[in-house]
Amino acid sequence: MKIIGTMPPPQHEAQNMLIARHPLIEGARFNTGARSPYPPLKTLEMLLEAIGEKDFWLDLKGRQLRIAKWAVPTYGDIELNHEIEINGPAKIIFRDGQSSLIIEAIGNKIYVEPDPPCAVGAGQAVNIHCDDLKIKGYFTEEDLAYIEAAKSLDFHNYMLSFVEEESDITGMIELDPNCQIVAKIESPKGLDFVDDVFPDYRDRVRLMAARDDLFTNIGDDKSLIFEALQKILWADPEAIVASRLLTSLQSNLAVSIQDMSDFKLMLDMGYQNFMLSDNLCYKREPFLAALDVIENSRHWIL
């Protein structure tokens, strides 16, 4: 079993050193959606120094939709990080599970009904459900800045969010010909990528079952998540499973039976590579509690 942590921005030196030095941690990623006070080059230099010889990945945002600016929709629009086109009914789902209909989309601005119950924050990830949704572009300006910083440091490991098309991979290769990629599968189009495109890129691409957004986007029949998780693992026996792991520890250091059962299910399904979320890794106590559960799972016998 291999465990990948999530490193907070580099100003959190003590937590980053705890993650980097823990014997159960094989490697870590940095979610570039997190706010660093430093430019990409310095951010990456500090994180690489902290992680040392362990594996490390830059988690780029790619196609993932995020709110670009704080917004109170009552007074107008919600601005996204990508321009979109929708054809037909569309619904936006916010991180707290609230949803609204999209009445109009103009470039990267949307107008919704009903308004969310509170203001929506910059950086918040969202999902849009629409039979014909087009998200324009893949890499964000911040992604491109981090890629340039990585290449200048001779670093080439990336996680790509919402991989759905071959051009997502070829675009990364054009930007960094030496890249090694973890493709995060988070949508039905991503599952099509697993079938149709991934076999041609096994030499430089691994898969990740990013369960949070994948579950949100899987469709009305949520039981399809099991087939999706199995498909990803069959395609790539070294696939990483992430999101919604041991979430009870974020608010209570006593793990829930649901979380224990879920972790055991992933083990029984055959997953051996696990990535812990920002919310588990950004604070000392939840992080250590999660690793205690994982260490004890080696002894679970049914």
Image (cartoon, helix red, strand yellow):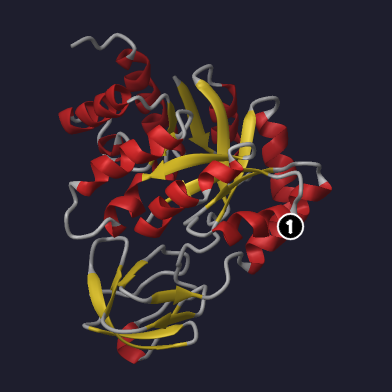
Write the residue at 26% across / 42% down: 227
What x and y, as percent, mark residue 137? 58, 72
Nearer to us in this view, 28 or 194: 194
| Dot 1: element | helix
Left or right: residue 40 versus residue 264 is: right
Give the image location of residue 108, x and y in percent. 48, 82
Residue 118 x/y as whole percent: 28, 74
Q: Nearer the viewer, residue 237 or 243?
A: 237
Q: Is residue 255 visible?
A: no
Q: Is residue 77 above or below residue 250?
A: below
Task: Report how many numbered discs are placed on residues in the image.
Answer: 1
Q: Quadrant of residue 45?
A: top right
Residue drawn at (76%, 49%) of the image: 177
- Left or right, 16 with respect to 2, comes to right
Quadrant (top left, top right, bottom left, bottom right) of the N terminus:
top left
Q: In which quarter of the view is residue 241 placed?
A: top left
Residue at (47% x, 65% y) in the render:
123
Residue 191 lies left or right of residue 22; in this view the side is left
* Up/down of 135 relative to 225, above or below: below
The answer, for residue 213, to whether it is visible in the render is yes
Residue that numbered label 1 is attached to: 174
Closer to the camera, 62 or 88? 88
Q: Which amino acid does label 1 sit on?
A: Glu
Q: Which residue is drawn at 25% across and 37% down?
A: 248
Residue 191 x %, y %: 39, 51
The C terminus, quarter of image: top left
Q: Residues within 10 Å of mark 1 (few under 14, many from 20)?
A: few
Is 54 rendered above or below residue 29?
A: above
